[in-house]
Image: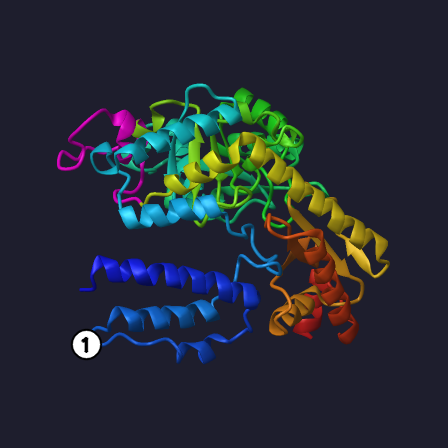
């Protein structure tokens, strides 16, 4: 085995190489999976020395899409936060697990402090929560709490004879449907409520569907309000949805994986008005807060409910201290990686005010992009942005083809989605290291590529018809 000194020499060099090469080539040339597969070394009988492994890691770095560069607009994350990265590296080297205070030590206290602070931003003074590997899993924990709250016997006896329903908008995250199958509700019992042109759930349509389901013998179990949808960045009207949930005695979960961070901005937090009335909230710090993947938390205002509905005894594990710092008693995981240290380090570095300024700067960049689109007669803004995604299309040009060609030429990584029946380009403005000039360059590339493409229709139904002929 290599000595600690050898590792200590190689690791900094690898980090420097990563930073330098991403600076030189921020967009990696696209390689099909079949072409790249042959370049990945196989697993063999004999192991290799650490220098060989480091060289192979450098090669992998050079072929990995760069999410930190000025031309990455593809996902709801991007950029590199130095303080958070230091926390991530430290957590990896410490290699602690987060199920008990006996093993986690101060990190368990950090997790509790973060949950309290985030809960206070929601409006809860005494709350509970758990960090999870991604927003889908945080949404799953919310669905588990909703199920056990609605059907108390379900945890012990299962869902036999229970006809529960879950309500989410037609723009809600796909994990809501996936989780319905996991908790025993069934995918067929998820109701997709219509939205307005801006992508927000219609409360009247929700109430009508709930009443219809009750008449049919169903028991409404959970309303999922989305705070910043994946494509349009839309915020469901939480206040009226909370009123319906309270009157109907239904669990209200807010999937704020993307949008909960707006709670940190006095200027924009009103987009989540009413969130304090929710029963549970998902909040992903690896999105707007820039913490390395992944860093998601499920917070509930019902203290003790996580342990009541998820906890299991394990004498070989929970041997010291109180359950308050033994997070394994309220997690769906046993072994759980340390995702709290990087968020704590980043928050210590930025503070509440720094995060507010960061979010407001990104929103300013959104308005900059909107102005570019509105000033260009060849571009069409799909909807007025409510968050950090800007959806638009180029008139008479395929949005999918533009995105593919940007990637193929190594100019930018950007995705596409569907807005009001049309295939649009979804530009994400979430990387705090990007500048207005980076977005200006992006739109120049879009114009150049659009000029080289043939006429095409972005109407989704029209494209389906043309493909079927």
Residue 457 locus on image (x, y percent): 76, 66
Quadrant of the image occupied by residue 239:
top right
Query: What's the magenta region?
Result: 308-336
Does residue 273 show up? yes
Who is closer to the viewer here, 150 or 431?
431
Crowd around label 1: few <14 · some 14–19 · many ≥20 (10 Å): few
Q: Residue at x 65, y 44 (%)?
A: 362
Judge left or right: residue 369 versus residue 93: right
Residue 100 locus on image (x, y percent): 24, 35
User: Quick check: is 310 in the magenta stretch?
Assistant: yes
Who is closer to the viewer here, 338 or 271?
338
Residue 99 locus on image (x, y percent): 26, 38
Count up the numbered dots.
Answer: 1
Q: Residue at x 27, y 46 (%)?
A: 94
Which residue is labeled 1 in the image? Answer: 45
Vertical position of residue 251 compared to residue 373: above or below = above
Q: Residue at x 57, y 29 (%)?
A: 211
Q: Residue at x 34, y 27 (%)?
A: 152
């Amino acid at each position: 085995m290599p000595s600690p000194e050898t590792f200590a020499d190689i690791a900094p060099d690898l980090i420097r190489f990563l930073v330098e090469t991403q600076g030189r080539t921020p967009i990696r040339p696209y390689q099909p999976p079949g072409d790249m597969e042959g370049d990945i070394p196989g697993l063999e009988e004999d192991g290799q020395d650490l220098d060989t492994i480091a060289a192979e890691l450098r090669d992998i770095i050079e072929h990995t899409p760069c999410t930190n560069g000025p031309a990455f607009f593809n996902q709801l994350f991007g950029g590199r936060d130095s303080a958070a990265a230091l926390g991530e590296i430290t957590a990896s080297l410490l290699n602690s697990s987060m199920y008990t205070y006996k093993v986690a030590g101060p990190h368990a206290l950090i997790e509790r402090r973060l949950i309290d602070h985030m809960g206070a931003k929601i409006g809860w003074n005494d709350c509970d929560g758990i960090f999870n590997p991604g927003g889908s899993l945080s949404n799953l924990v919310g669905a588990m709490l909703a199920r056990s709250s609605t059907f108390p016997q379900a945890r012990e006896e299962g869902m036999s004879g229970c006809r529960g329903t879950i309500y989410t908008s037609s723009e809600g995250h796909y994990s809501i449907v996936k989780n319905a199958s996991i908790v025993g509700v069934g995918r067929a019992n998820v109701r997709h409520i219509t939205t307005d042109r801006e992508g927000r759930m219609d409360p009247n349509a929700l109430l009508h569907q709930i009443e219809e389901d009750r008449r049919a013998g169903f028991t409404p179990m959970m309303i999922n309000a989305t705070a910043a949808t994946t494509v349009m960045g839309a915020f469901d009207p939480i206040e009226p949805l909370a009123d319906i949930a309270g009157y109907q005695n239904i669990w209200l979960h807010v999937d704020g994986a993307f949008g909960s961070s707006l709670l940190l901005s006095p200027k924009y937090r009103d987009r989540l008005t009413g969130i304090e009335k929710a029963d549970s909230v998902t909040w992903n710090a690896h999105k707007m807060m820039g913490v390395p993947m992944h860093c998601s938390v499920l917070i509930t205002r019902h203290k003790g409910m996580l342990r009541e509905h998820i906890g299991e005894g394990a004498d070989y594990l929970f041997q010291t201290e109180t359950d308050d710092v033994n997070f394994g008693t309220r997690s769906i995981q046993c072994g759980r990686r340390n995702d709290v240290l990087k968020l704590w380090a980043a928050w210590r570095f930025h503070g509440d005010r720094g995060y507010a300024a960061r979010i407001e700067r990104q929103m300013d960049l959104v308005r900059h992009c909107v102005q570019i689109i509105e000033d260009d007669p060849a571009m069409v803004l799909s909807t007025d942005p409510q968050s950090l995604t800007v959806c638009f299309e180029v008139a008479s040009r395929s949005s999918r083809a533009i995105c593919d060609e940007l990637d193929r030429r190594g100019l930018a990584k950007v995705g596409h989605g569907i807005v009001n029946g049309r295939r649009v380009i979804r530009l994400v403005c979430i990387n705090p290291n990007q500048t207005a000039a980076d977005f200006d360059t992006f739109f120049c590339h879009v114009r150049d590529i659009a000029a080289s493409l043939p006429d095409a229709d972005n109407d989704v139904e029209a494209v389906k018809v043309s493909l079927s002929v």
